Amino acid sequence: MNTINLTIEFKPLTVLVGGNELEVEELSIPLPFGRKPSNINDITSSGHSTVYVTETREMNPEEFDGFSMNLNKSRDWLKGTGGLLCQGHLCVMVHAPGRPYLFVDASGGDSVEYLARLG
């Protein structure tokens, strides 16, 4: 089996959000975001946006599978996260071993409003 290894860089930035400074990491490539997907197979995107990672959430594969197949469910750890910034989304990066990376913008709510997938 042939494999391809990709390197995607993160650039640390300080941005101003609502009058407060916020430390983020900008993904080196824009990603397509879907609005209100029910699961990771339901992402219908309209254009690419810059990704600004505000925090990372590591999960085990079982937690990730439960999350990714029920994205509309309310989750305390998403409450108040996300939002739009310039031409991009403030996101929580979600990952588990052997699973894709998800970039979640809850737009201040407690469930997935916008989602991008890498992998």
Image (cartoon, rainbow, N blue to C red):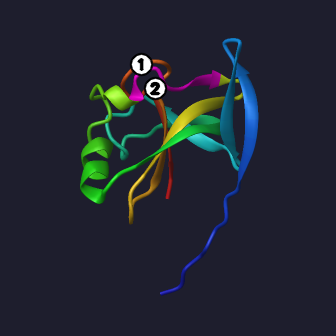
Report the magenta residues as a range. 78-84
Residue 38 among those drawn in magenta: no
Identify residue type, mark 1: Gly
Judged left or right of residue 12, residue 2 is left
91 relative to 64, above or below: above
Q: Residue furthest bottom?
A: 1
What secondary structure is marked by label 1?
A: loop
Residue 8 numbered mark, or none: none
Residue 109 numbered mark, or none: 1
Residue 79 found in image quarter: top left
Viewer-closest of 103 and 40:
103
Residue 80 among those drawn in magenta: yes
Residue 41: x and y in percent read: 36, 46
User: How many residues crowd mark 1 within 10 Å: few (<14), some (14–19), many (20+)?
Assistant: some
Judged left or right of residue 40, residue 6 is right
Judged left or right of residue 13, residue 74 is left
Residue at 36% across, 26% down = 111
Residue 60: x and y in percent read: 31, 56
Residue at 66% across, 37% down = 24
Residue at 70% across, 49% down = 29
Residue 108: x and y in percent read: 48, 18
What secondary structure is marked by label 2?
A: loop
Residue at 27% across, 29% down = 73
Residue 106 numbered mark, or none: 2
